[in-house]
Each structure stands twice: as C-alpha cells, then as structure tokens.
Amino acid sequence: MASPRPLPPSRAYNALRDQLGSVRRIYLRSNRIVRHDDFAQAPETVLLLHGFFQTRQVWQVMEDRLRCDGFGVFSFDLGGLFWRLNNRSIGDQARMVGDKLEGISQRYGLGRLHIVGHSMGGLIARHYIQHHGGAARIKSLVTLGTPHRGTPTAALGVWLMGGGLLSSNPWEMVPFSPFMRALNRDVFPASVPLTSIYSSADLICPARFSRLSPRPGEDHLQNRPVKGIGHTALTYDPGVYVMVRTALQQASALWAERASD
C-alpha cells in the first residue's frame, strides 16, 4: 500500500493559514485599524471580538462586507502580550467589554447591538452577556469556531503561556475546567439569540466542542455546522459570511417585532 503523498508547500501553507491566520496580516500588524465613527448611525450595529493571541486585524474582510451591507461595525483593542496579542483572562475581558460599551453608548447614543465573536471572542461575549449585564445591551450573538465546551488544543496554549504564568485563559478553555462548567451551567438569556457556526475542518476548535447543547425550550440557541473551512478562515469565508448576515438579519427582525408589540 502506497504511503500518502505529502502536501505541496503552497497547499500546506494555505492549510496552516486557514487554521491560524496570516502571520503578516494578523500577528505582525498592530491593533491599529482604520476607525469609522459612523457605526452608530446605521440601523443595526455589530461589535466584532477576536480570539486568543490574535488581533482585530482578523476582522478586516468581515468588517468590509458588513459595512457594504449597511451595518455599522466596530471592534475593540483587547490588548494583551506586547500590547497587541490577546492573552488576558476571559472574565477580565468581559468586564472590559462591558465598560467600553457603556462609554461608547453614552458618547454616541448607541442602543442595543449585535456581537460576532471568533474563537475565544465568543466566550468573552457569552461571559459578558451572562454575568456582566450584557443581556440589556445585546440583540444577538453569533460565534465562529468558539469552544463552547472548551477545546483540547487549549493545552497547547497553556504550554505557550508558560503553564499559566503569562495568561490564565488557556486553562479556562480546557474542557471541563471550572470556567467552562460554570459558563454552561448558567442559563443563557432567552432574549438574546445565540448562533454557533463551526466547521468539521477546524483543528483549533473541533466541531463537537463548538456545538451548543440547548436545554428543552431553548430555541434561541442554534447550531450551524459547515464543512471544509479552517479555524481562522471562518472569519473571511464568503459562505460563512452569508450565514452570519442571515443570523443578524433574523435577530434584527425579531427585535423589530418585539418593539412593535
């Protein structure tokens, strides 16, 4: 039996980039982006939250597409190692997101908004909504490759962070960690639709760890699996974008219906 042929260098690089993202465009670039102060003027506003050890440069394609479709869009500099690589604890970041949102809301007269979170960014959003008053501010949450049940690859992050000396959040994302058990034990607010989009080809957060486990009657929790898309590629794949846009539009229609009652 012939052994499988190794991937050509170009295909191997593309596969690695789809999982981890472009070194040049995400990791080596700072968190500085082109700011748009018109996000509060759009009918619907979206906050983008990136994941562990990445920067908000990961959202460049998603932001352009959302703005083209009429959404107001902004993102946060979550700080971290070297002032750019996100490695702060999930709880600290959730509190920071809440504080920043309140300040921005007062400054721009911003009402309720949506959040799209990639990887750990989805956990930050969940923690904010479940434990820091976010249910009163958020219309919907869409997560991409988020480890709602933790992920085995967090063990690599533990090693990368010096066994927890540089950051505690990889420990938080280990399956069955106290953080993950507490997050899934608590009920996600029924007023906020939550859609989890995940891929069978995601090696960073395998699909079964991204699936939500709705309790009876929790129709506001939805799973949307896809195939053949890497972990970071979820943020720029065109098909995934259509799913994100659809989830945002459905949530917007739901809130418009609630307002008319």
Image (spheres, helix red, strand yellow):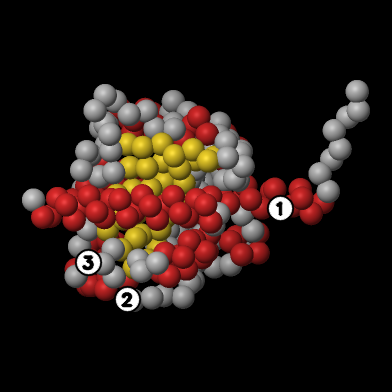
- Up-down: is 163 above or below 11? above
| Residue at point 60%, 45% (across, down) | 230
- Label 3 with label 2: CB-CB less than 8 Å: no
What residue is pinned by disc 1? 14
Question: Is residue 54 or residue 192 the one in the foreground?
Answer: 192
- Up-down: is 25 above or below 38? above
- Up-down: is 187 above or below 160? above
Report the quarter where the N terminus lies.
top right
First in sequence: mark 1 vs mark 3: 1
- Up-down: is 228 above or below 114? above
First in sequence: mark 3 vs mark 2: 2
What residue is pinned by disc 2? 38
What residue is pinned by disc 3? 110
- Mark 2 neighbour density, 10 Å: few (under 14) some (14–19) many (20 or more): few
- Label 1 with label 3: CB-CB less than 8 Å: no
Question: Is residue 26 or residue 66 the one in the foreground?
Answer: 66
> Label 2 amino acid?
Asp
| Disc ID at residue 175 | none
* 70 left or right, relative to 23: left
Question: Is residue 45 or residue 118 the one in the foreground?
Answer: 45
Residue 49 at x, y percent in the picture? 41, 55
> Label 3 amino acid?
Leu
Residue 59 at x, y percent in the picture? 49, 61
Question: Is residue 236 or residue 19 the one in the foreground?
Answer: 236
- Mark 1 neighbour density, 10 Å: few (under 14) some (14–19) many (20 or more): some
| Residue at point 61%, 39% (across, down) | 201
Residue 140 at x, y percent in the picture? 29, 49
Give the SS element for disc 3.
loop
| Residue at point 22%, 58% (across, down) | 112
Q: How many angstroms separate mark 3 from mark 2 (CA)? A: 11 Å
Let me know if residue 123 appears in the view. Answer: no
